[in-house]
Image (spheres, rainbow, N blue to C red):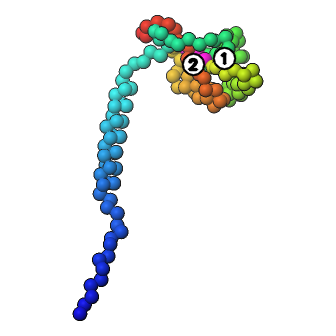
Amino acid sequence: MKLRLAEQTSEDIDMTPMIDIVFQLIIFFMVASSFVEEAKVFKVSVPKAEAPETISTEEARTIAVTKDGDVAPAGATDKKQKYESLLDLIEELKAYKLQREKEGKEAIVVIAGDKDANYARVIQVWNAIKNAGIRQVSFQVEIGKPE
């Protein structure tokens, strides 16, 4: 007489549902990335706003970005006052932040970018401000309808 052994249970995991989900995610990201490409067609005029939020610039540090890509404190009267590198800007802003913290106030920086300035340069300045530890960053705009 032969004895039957108890059925052995299979410990394999069914991969079919996981593969289905992975394929659906791939399709989703492929479709979503095609919309990103279409968004690059639109022209954006950044320097004007109809009703901008105003902040007190008396207590804020204003950084100017010229159309040539020079970065300097707003109101600089000489080319020698521009920042030679973004590291110089970061060091000055760290000192400004420490000074504001000693006074018990928040450090605020306003970026005044020329409307013809390279957008990448404005973003580099913004990243430098964030690297200095300042979280309150605003952009200076003119009041008016976008062109």
Q: Which residue is mark 2?
A: 138
Q: Is residue 65 visible?
A: no
The N terminus: image quadrant: bottom left
Quick one: SS at disc 2?
Answer: strand
Q: Is residue 145 left or right of residue 28?
A: right
Please report the residue visible at 60 percent of the width from the left and 23 percent of the height from the top. Answer: 136
Q: Which disc is residue 70 wearing?
A: none
Please report the residue visible at 62 percent of the width from the left and 11 percent of the height from the top. Answer: 56
| Above or below for 57 versus 120 | above
How many other residues sit within 10 Å of disc 1, few (<14), some (14-19) or many (≥20)? some
Spot occupied by residue 16 in the image (x, y as percentages of width and height): 29, 57
Q: Which residue is mark 1?
A: 61
The question of residue 143 being in magenta is answered with no
The question of residue 112 being in magenta is answered with yes
Spot occupied by residue 75 in the image (x, y as percentages of width and height): 67, 10
What is the count of numbered marks?
2
Q: Is residue 47 left or right of residue 38?
A: right
Q: Quadrant of residue 10?
A: bottom left
- For the stretch drawn in magenta, the main secondary structure is strand
Task: Give the spatial CA distance, label 2 vs label 1.
Answer: 10 Å
Q: Which amino acid is tagged 2?
A: Ser
Please report the residue visible at 55 percent of the width from the left and 22 percent of the height from the top. Answer: 122
How many other residues sit within 10 Å of disc 2, few (<14), some (14-19) or many (≥20)? some
Please report the residue visible at 72 percent of the width from the left and 22 percent of the height from the top. Answer: 104
Which residue is more in the foreground, 76 or 137? 137
The C terminus: image quadrant: top left
| Above or below for 61 versus 129 | above
Among the two numbered marks 2 and 1 on one chain, the one whose residue lies closer to the N terminus = 1
For the record, the magenta segment spans 110-114
